Amino acid sequence: MRLAGAVLSAAGLSLFAWCVSLFVRIGKGTLAPWDPTRALVAIGPYRFVRNPMITGVALILAGESLFFRSWLLAAWTALFVMLNHVYFLALEEPGLHRRFGEQYRRYATAVPRWLPRLRRRT
């Protein structure tokens, strides 16, 4: 369990770091609300899901749950995912629609929010 948790956390940290680097290089901003991206990031893991950064953090938390064999951390992971889902529906996505308009609407239509599609759309 400890090895699986460590691998899961490392994968999540790698995904998170990749997303942050894309925000800086492509989006010309950061994940901080006072310095948001100025361009829509739709490459790398963002081609498959709209919120891979949150997925990375959830993987880190899930890995910690396994590593420490903690039901409390597992519950926190589930709560983190639920809170982010509500936040994205209520605030993040409407804000992205306002900032990026039609470009974000097309992106949101083509790319799923959380889970990648198993097959490409035709």
Image: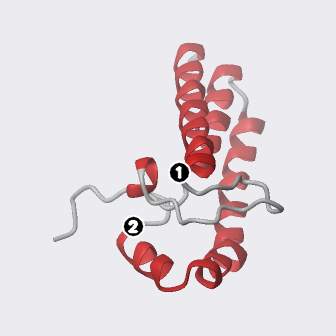
- Circle 1 residue: 52
Quarter of the image with the N terminus in it? top right
Location of residue 50 with respect to 99 vertically, above or below: above
- For image coordinates 78% across by 59% down, the residue present is 35
Residue type indicated by callout 2: Val
- For image coordinates 61% across by 36% down, the residue present is 17
- For image coordinates 68% across by 39% down, the residue present is 74
First reached walking from the N terminus: tag 2 or tag 1: 1
Q: Nearer the viewer, residue 74 or 111?
A: 111
Q: Nearer the viewer, residue 68 or 31?
A: 31
Residue type indicated by callout 1: Pro
Q: Residues within 10 Å of mark 1 (few under 14, many from 20)?
A: many
Quarter of the image with the C terminus in it? bottom left
Q: Is residue 48 visible?
A: no
Tag 2–tag 1 contact (CB < 8 Å):
no
Q: Position of residue 21 (x, y in %)?
A: 59, 41
Could you give the CA–CA distance between mark 2 and mark 1, rounded to whole angstroms? Answer: 11 Å
The picture quadrant where one finds residue 94 is: bottom right
- Circle 2 residue: 111
| In the image, farthest residue toward the left | 122
Q: Secondary structure at mark 1?
A: helix
